[in-house]
């Protein structure tokens, strides 16, 4: 799930999240090979921050921390919002995963008292419907249920929202050799229709893309240009996360453009992005987000990295397509 600020996730209070971030950085210090996670052919699709990737894998995001200023309006002042979040997904049978996510939010209105608490809990399901490894392509479908009233009443809706979703990922490694330096490019996308279980509220189309340039892919599958670490393990990207109301209310599209970089290691991914509002209705200032993805399938391979029921994971790949660290 994606939003104006960050993908929702199962969160921890602020200070324990900071401590766990330090643990994650320690885990990342041991360089080696990324064995599992989102592979399609030779292409590794990283977990992105603002939009969800199309893979049904075992994932642990712990934590994502974002800071953004919401605009003034409807009698409320400009408000700084801090979200601290994480997410856990588990593959149940090959290509199908269930997830649980939420967010702990701190609101700091200009000239007003601070308010903090949990957002509504959300549960999700995702299924990898079509995969074409030779063309680094994947298409998935899914759904998310935001459980109304499960968070702090002053911060959340007391009604539920159901969101059917589609996802895709496409790497450009199948381009001709004359365009070899475009081969590290990849595009992922997500479309969701948020349907509140209350007729007075608008349905909202959430749509987003992530355009990535994989320096590990360049080094390993195109041409070794001699990049030193840590640059050879980085994936620069820009994400677009948008929301368009569909009925019963204003139709202005809001959203953010999010340039940043992801750094990959065997045990985790560390990412950082700017949050740039596309218009005044989205926000008055640029924000920021950092995220840590812990590769639990590589840290605990006997427990994670394979489905609970059935054969091997559709997305697990321990071949030479992994990153050589």
Image (cartoon, rainbow, N blue to C red):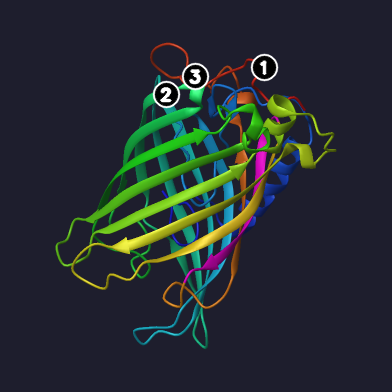
Q: Position of residue 57 (x, y in %)?
A: 48, 29
Q: Could you tell me which secondary element the residue under label 2 belongs to?
A: strand
Disc 1/disc 2 C-alpha distance (Å): 19 Å
Mark 1: few/some/many CA within 10 Å (<14, 14-19, 20+): few
Q: What main secondary structure does the magenta stretch of the protein show? A: strand
Neighbor class of circle 2 (other Cα within 10 Å; few <14, some 14-19, many 20+) is some
Q: Gap in Å between the C-alphas at discs 3 and 2?
A: 18 Å
Between tags 3 and 1, which lies in front? 1
Task: Find the magenta span and give its range.
Answer: 266-278
The residue located at (78%, 31%) in the rendering is: 30
Upstream in sequence: badge 3 or badge 1: 3
Quarter placement of the C terminus: top right
Using the image as rendered, state which of residue 121 and residue 46 is in the foreground.
46
State which tag comes first along the sequence, 1 or 2: 2
Looking at the picture, tell me which residue is in the foreground, 272 or 242. 242
Dot 3 corresponds to which residue?
306
Q: Pointer 1: what residue?
A: 320
Q: Secondary structure at mark 3?
A: loop
Q: Are marks 3 and 1 in contact (CB under 8 Å)?
A: no
CA distance separating discs 3 and 1: 19 Å
Q: Are marks 3 and 2 in contact (CB under 8 Å)?
A: no
Residue 105, how many percent across, how many down? 49, 63
Residue bearing mark 2: 131
Relative to 105, say whether 300 is above or below: above
Q: Is residue 86 above or below residue 185?
A: below
Per the image, label 1 sits on a secondary structure element best described as loop
Q: Let me know if residue 273 is in the magenta part.
A: yes
Residue 312 picture location, percent across and down = 47, 13
């Amino acid at each position: 799930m994606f939003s104006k600020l960050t993908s929702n996730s199962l969160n921890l209070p602020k200070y324990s999240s900071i401590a766990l971030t330090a643990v994650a950085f320690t885990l990342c210090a041991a360089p080696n090979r990324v064995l599992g996670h989102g592979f399609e052919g030779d292409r590794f699709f990283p977990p992105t921050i603002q939009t969800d990737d199309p893979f049904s894998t075992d994932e642990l995001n712990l934590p994502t921390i974002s800071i953004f200023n919401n605009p003034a309006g409807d009698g409320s002042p400009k408000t700084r919002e801090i979200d601290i979040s994480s997410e856990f997904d588990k593959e149940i049978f090959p290509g199908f995963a269930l997830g649980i996510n939420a967010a702990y939010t701190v609101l700091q209105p200009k000239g007003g008292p601070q308010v903090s608490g949990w957002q509504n809990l959300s549960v999700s399901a995702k299924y990898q419907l079509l995969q074409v490894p030779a063309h680094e392509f994947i298409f998935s479908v899914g759904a998310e249920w935001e459980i109304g009233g499960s968070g702090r009443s002053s911060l959340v809706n007391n009604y539920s929202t159901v969101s059917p979703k589609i996802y895709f990922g496409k790497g450009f490694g199948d381009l001709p050799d004359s365009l070899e330096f475009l081969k590290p490019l990849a595009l992922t996308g997500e479309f969701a229709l948020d349907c509140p279980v209350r007729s007075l509220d608008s349905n909202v189309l959430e749509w987003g893309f992530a355009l990535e340039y994989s320096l590990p892919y360049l080094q390993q599958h195109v041409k070794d240009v001699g990049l030193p670490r840590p640059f050879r393990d980085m994936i620069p990207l820009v994400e677009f996360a948008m929301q368009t109301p569909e009925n019963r209310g204003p139709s202005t599209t809001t959203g953010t453009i999010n340039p940043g970089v992801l750094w990959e290691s065997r045990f985790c991914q560390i990412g950082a992005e700017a949050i740039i509002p596309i218009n005044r209705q989205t926000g008055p200032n640029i924000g920021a987000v950092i995220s840590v993805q812990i590769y639990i399938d590589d840290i605990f391979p006997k427990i994670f990295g394979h489905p609970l029921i059935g054969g091997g994971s559709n997305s697990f790949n321990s071949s030479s397509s992994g990153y050589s660290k």
